[in-house]
Every structure is written in structure tokens, then in C-alpha cells.
Amino acid sequence: MTSTSVASPSFGELALLPAVLSAVETLGYETPSPIQAQTIPALLEGRDMLGQAQTGTGKTAAFALPLLSRLELERREPQVLVLAPTRELAQQVAMSFTKYGQNLKGMGVATLCGGQEYREQISALKRGAQVVVGTPGRVIDHLDRGTLKLDGLSALVLDEADEMLRMGFIDDVKRVVADTPTDAQRVFFSATLPDEIERIVNRYLVDPVKVMIESSVGTAESIDQRLVRVEGGAKLEALSRIIEVEPVDAAIVFVRTRAACTTLVEQLTARGVNVAGLSGDLDQSLRERTIMRLKRGKVDVLIATDVAARGLDVPRITHVINYDLPQDSEAYTHRIGRTGRAGRTGVAITFAGFRETRKVRWLEQATGQQMSDMPLPDEKAIRAHRDEVFRERVVGALTAGTDEQRSLVERLVADGHDPLELACAFATIARADEAPIGRLPSPRAERTERGPREGKPRRSEDRGPSEGMTRYRVAVGHKDGVKPGQLVGALANEGGIEGNRIGRIDIRNAFSVVELPSSLPTSVLAKMARARVAGRALEISEDRGVPERAPRRRNEDDAPIRRRERA
């Protein structure tokens, strides 16, 4: 395995196809990032590659630009296949290919992932898309249906290979790699290199170029980094309290997915917060209008995903709040870097549950700075804050003059009302619209509700489903060789929800029981039911507690296999 180390040239010196280079220049890119400078020349030569780089280093352009430059547009068949672990990442990669290939006449991109109708995906393939981006499970479905053929494939890309391993897709990945033509270029990107990924690399990559980009994580000293211990069910109330009490001029709240962005915008709007959303599915004009509203003070809180907030620079941002933990330290640094810019001070607040301590410590080690514990404002603090805000309004009104109301007050005093009592009545009327203060469970109560410590699973029949969750039965189990990570990946991708919203998973011999949020719409459950794991549709249905049918004599091998997944 060889390694490259190339000085940073300009994009114009990288031998990209003129139409691709023109798109890069139109998008305003000037100098390649380190991974782009090291990767693009080797991929243009058709070399196999193993790239080790974190999210946020520019790796999508690193493989998209050279592979687009090598497309044979007259061939109306898949030439490039990109596998991604999640639907959101697959869609982001597909959008990047479309953007970089905007000047390639006849170039098509098909996105194959859960949550979309098969009909739309099959139509894109029939139109002759040369670039296919998808999640492993849906790609294999199309291979099995015969709607996707890899005979003409010239390049296969595995993006975030270690994440696919973590989510239980490794067998699907092996199947796709094995079905790829032997002369096709193979490109693997992974933030880490666990043993299983190393084995696949050694088996399928031929004399690969190895590119390793060291994480250049650093954080501004002008940013006050704080940690709030709060579990998922209390995060909305915690966020509302912080927005109300903290001296926020403008804030960005980071979430993992577009669905979470939409939901949080709706919830905060209902609480009277001046909020807007910024996610990857917004077109450029709407994105620009949203940012301009933030700059002009017409929006105070912006809910954003990582990809949507890239390059965002708004001077009035005083706070960044990590509502969901970022995937890696690079993403964390990018997030909190939206505040504390150009010599200004800023505040970065991170929400984390008690079981996410390891991730927090990892972020602290990577950034070299420790987060200070931040207690949430209690009811007394909120009331004191509201009193102070109202007091300032009253003083401001006195300064502006009160002549218009003087005659009314004089009449009420003449009627025998005490002036102090009148003032109290006016204050009650003026503050009638203040939102009620929500309940925030204590940390000890949260830990009790969450059950035993990790590593000590509790039998699912010992208690009912977790609060806010419903148990569902899926038609795959131990006999199908299914693993918890496979179920999490399939359900999250097909239903378009966050993996951490999936509760306990209890794998039996012939089926499995999964806890899902009770608020999931029927349409989402229907999509999940179509997901396939181990070659079988999940056929999801609400679990009624009917025991698994067992033979009269059972030995130890027949016992149910129970596994818990902490998504």
C-alpha cells in the first residue's frame, strides 16, 4: 500500500474535466482542501484508494470531482456507485454530484435509499443515470429485483465505511463489493479503520493509494463551552428555558436530521419563539432569504443541520446549542465556530444524556478544552428573569411618558381604588400572555426512568414499554441471523427518523420486538414495514404480547436471544 503527499495546487492544475472545473469555479471554490489535493490526482488515474478522514474535510468533492471527470456520458448505465450509511448522507452526496456535474449534458444521478417510492427510483435508473448513490439495504433490494445492474460499473465508493460497520451493514457491503466488476475502481473512506474494514480493504482493493488526513481540530479561546446534562424527553423544555434566560442575541441550534429540524421549529414556534429552520433540502434562494432574516433580526433562533450551516457567518450569533451531539469532533468544531468570531465572545452549549459521557469526553480530548457544567434555570430563576424583563419595560414606559393613560388612572383613583392595587392589576393584565413554565424532571428521576445501567439488560417482559414508546413486532429474528444494528439502520433509514429515537430491541428466534416512539405517523410505520433485513421484509405490526410458539421440548439452543440496542 502506497501513500501520497502532494502540495496544494489550484483546482485548475488538477486535470479535471473542463465542464467539472467550470462548475467548481461557479461555486466559488478556489483552493482544494488537503484531502482533495491528495485524492483527486490518484482517482483521475483510476487507482484504488483508502482514505482516512473525518466528516467535514471535503471528502465528497475529493471523490466526486475526479469520478465525474471520468464519466462516459454516452453510456446510459450506472458507472459510479456510492454507498452511504444513512439516507441523509446519501441525499447529500447525490446533491453534491448533481451540483458538481451541472455542466455535464446528459449526466443523471439516481438516489436509492429508504423513505422513497421504488417507482421514482426505478424511473431514474431507467432514464440511464450514470451515478447511483444509496444505502446498502436499498441498493441490494434493487440488485435482487433486477432493477440495478452493475455490469458497466467503473467505480465503487464506500463513504463512512466504519459507520456502516457500526450500523450492521457490513454483510450488505460485502455483497455489493463482491458483485462489483473485478476491474472497477474501488474507493473506501473511513474515519477509523477497525479490523473488519481492514480485512475488506486487503481482500478487495488492489495496490491502493492510502491518504490519511490528520484531524486539525482546534477551538477558539473566545468561546465559553458548557455542558447541560439532560435526557431526550426533557431537551425541549431545557432549550426553551435557556433561550428565555440566557442573554441571546441570536442562536443556532444544531440537530442531526432534517426531520428533527422541522419538528423543533414547529415546537418552538408554538412556544412563541421567533425561529426558522435551515436544512439540506432548502433551495439556494430560500436558504439565502433565511440567513438574511437572521442577519436583520427578523429571526432570533435558527435550527440547523450540519450540512446546511456550512460556511454560515452571521455576526450577531452569540450562542450555539448542540441539541443533538455531533457525529465527530470536526463537526463539533465547525458548529461552535459559528460564534466567537472576529474577536467576539460566544457561548457553546452542548446537551448530553447520562449515557453519552464517553462521547463528551472524546470531544473534550479532541478539542483540548473541558466543558463546564451548566445547571438549567429552575422555576425561581425563570420567574426572577421575567420580573426583571417586565421591570425594564415599566421603566422604559415611564421614561417615554405616560400622559395618554394618566386620565384613566386618575379616574380609577377617584373611584376609591388604591394606587398600589391598581399597579398590581395593570401588571397582571400586561403579563397575562406569559407562557407557563414547563416541568423539568430531576436528573435522578430521569436515570430511574431509563432503567438499569448499560451492560445490565432487563428482560422486556419484566416491565411495559418505556414512556412515550410502543412495542412493535418485526418478522425477522435469530434464525435469520439478524443483529440489532441492522434493525436500527433499516428502521431509521426507511422511516427517516433518528437512530437514537429507537428504543430497546429484543431479538427472539422467529421475530424481534422493537420499541418505537408512540407518536410515529401511520405513513412512517408503513414505510418501515417495507424495509428489508436479511432478505426479508420487516412486516412491522404492534406487539400484542403473544408469546413465540415453541416446540414441546426446548433445549438451551431454542431459548430466545435478547439483545438491547442503545441507538
Image (cartoon, helix red, strand yellow):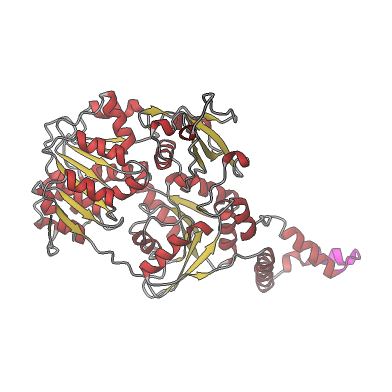
Q: Is residue 168 above or below residue 345?
A: above
- Majority secondary structure of magenta residues: helix
Place residue 108 in its image quadrant. top left
Q: Is residue 496 above or below residue 290?
A: above
Image-based side of 313 in relation to 128, left or right: right
- Does the magenta segment cover residue 53? no
- Does the magenta segment cover residue 411? yes
Q: Which residue: 36% across, 47% down?
A: 166
Quadrant position of the N terminus in the picture: bottom left
Front residue (pair 287, 1): 1
Residue 133 location (% of width, % of height)? 27, 39
Image-based side of 16 in relation to 337, left or right: left
Q: Can residue 124 be seen in the rendering of this structure? A: yes
Q: Which residue: 50% across, 34% down?
A: 559
Place residue 7 in its image quadrant. bottom left
Residue 167 location (% of width, % of height)? 37, 44
Q: Is residue 179 above or below residue 343?
A: above
Residue 555 location (% of width, % of height)? 49, 32
Magenta stretch: give its range: 407-418
